[in-house]
Image: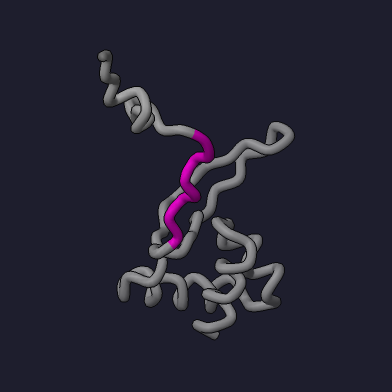
């Protein structure tokens, strides 16, 4: 079951535990126990969240892989100068 949870999160990114249970067809209590084990081992990062969707309050646990860094932004980074601008010589 560990591999199916980790594989699902690799493919889909951060997810609520209720959504994972429905997608993987696993009972929510079993999924929560397994997620707790994975979080204690350091494979997952979990936090309690409250979301309001269409006026309904949805509480759950949001989970993501612990080794899932965000992708770097494209383009030039602030404060970086071109090599041509750094050295100007006049004769």
Horizontally, residue 21 falls left or right of residue 66, namely right
Residue drawn 53% across the image and 53% down it: 60
Residue 12 percent coordinates (x, y): 63, 62
Quick one: quadrant of the C terminus?
Answer: top left
Horizontally, residue 18 falls left or right of residue 54, namely left
Residue drawn 53% across the image and 39% down it: 74
Vertical arrangement, residue 44 with respect to residue 50, above or below:
below
Looking at the image, the residue that sits furthest to the right is 54
Horizontally, residue 44 falls left or right of residue 91, namely right
Residue 64 percent coordinates (x, y): 48, 60
Q: Nearer the viewer, residue 5 or 55?
A: 5
Residue drawn 70% across the image and 77% down it: 25
Residue 84 percent coordinates (x, y): 37, 28
Q: Is residue 62 magenta?
A: no
Q: Nearer the viewer, residue 9 or 48?
A: 9
Q: Is residue 71 magenta?
A: yes
Vertical arrangement, residue 91 with respect to residue 57, above or below:
above
Quick one: quadrant of the N terminus?
Answer: bottom right
Residue drawn 42% across the image and 58% down it: 46
- Residue 13 falls in image quadrant: bottom right
Tell how many labels.
0
- Residue 4 falls in image quadrant: bottom right
Q: Which residues are magenta?
A: 68-75
């Amino acid at each position: 079951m560990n591999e199916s949870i980790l594989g699902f999160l690799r493919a889909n990114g951060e997810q609520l535990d209720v959504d994972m249970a429905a997608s993987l067809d696993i009972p929510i209590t079993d999924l929560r126990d397994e997620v707790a084990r994975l979080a204690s081992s350091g494979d997952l990062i979990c936090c309690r969240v409250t979301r309001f969707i269409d006026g309904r309050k949805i509480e759950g646990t949001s989970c993501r892989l612990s080794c899932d860094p965000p992708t770097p932004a494209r383009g030039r980074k602030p404060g970086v100068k071109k090599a041509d601008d750094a050295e100007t010589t006049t004769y």
